[in-house]
Each structure stands twice: as C-alpha cells, then as structure tokens.
Amino acid sequence: MMKQAIDERTELINGKVSAVVLFSTQAAFALAIAYMRYIQHLDTSYTGIFATILLASMGIYWGFRLYLSGALPVFPLRIYIAKYLAIVAVIVIPSGLIHGWPTAQNWTSTILPAATIPAIAIFLFWLIAFLGKRRIEQQIQD
C-alpha cells in the first residue's frame, strides 16, 4: 500500500485550486453567455456550453487535486498499453458490429477518434501520476 504524504499545506493548496477552478468556471459561463447573447445575438439554449465548461472544469479540478496529493500510482507501461487496448476494443468492436466497418473516407470520423481519445486520456492520467509522484518525492527529500 502506498503511503500518502498529505499535510495541512497540501490541503490548503488543494482548497485554493478548487476555489480558482470554481471562479474560472463561473467566469467562463458568464463570458460565454455574454458573447453568445450580445456579440452573436443568439437567443438559444446554453446547455451545451454549460456541459462543456462543467466537464472541463471538473477535469482540471480533479487533475490538480490528484497531482497535488500524489494519490495516483504510476503503473508499468504494459499495464497502460493493456488498458488502452481494452478501452479501444470496448469502443470499436460493438460499434463495428452495430454499424459495420467504416469506409476509408469515414475512417477519420469513426476509428480515429475511438483510437486517439483513449490514448490522450491515458497519457494525461500517466502524466498527472508521474508528476505528482515526482512532486511528493521532492518534498520528502527537501
């Protein structure tokens, strides 16, 4: 089991990060609505903007919290590759069975996103885990 190096300073930093993310989310909501309403003169539903900003801010918030706490384990490369292949298989195989194999013209809108989005997500997970582990090790050495 991995020991956690969480103290009052880390919790204070985590709290400040959460406050900044919350403020930036609210500011982004206000700016996006003002832009759409007063510059583009659109009077439409804003649920797409709300969902996008909410998901982005949650991802940033969780990333900072996990980085600052050093809570994510750094796995060997073969485990990341196995997770990537499993995720892509879960996406591509049922999609291929339901819709059929895409033509060469549709490849960039069907197979490419199914292969790149999990790779980006797994890379970001590894990066946050690696940097968080390195930060905690540097704090312990100092």
Image (tube, rainbow, N blue to C red):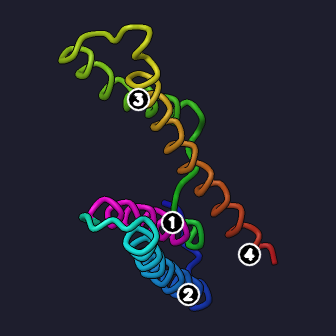
Q: Which residues are magenta?
A: 47-65
Q: Indicate the secondary structure of the residue bearing disc 1.
A: helix
Residue carrying label 3: 114
CA gap between label 2 and label 4 equals: 19 Å
Which residue type carries mark 1?
A: Ile
The residue most toward the right is: 142
**Residue 80, how many percent across, how many down?**
52, 36
| CA separation in Å, label 1 and label 4 | 23 Å
Q: Position of residue 131 (x, y in %)?
A: 67, 59
Q: Which residue is mark 4?
A: 139
Element under disc 2: helix
Front disc: 3 or 4: 3
In the displayed structure image, the side of residue 30 where residue 13 appears, left or right: right
Q: Residue at x 43, y 70 (%)?
A: 32
Location of residue 90 (image quadrant): top left
Q: CA distance from mark 1 to mark 2?
A: 13 Å
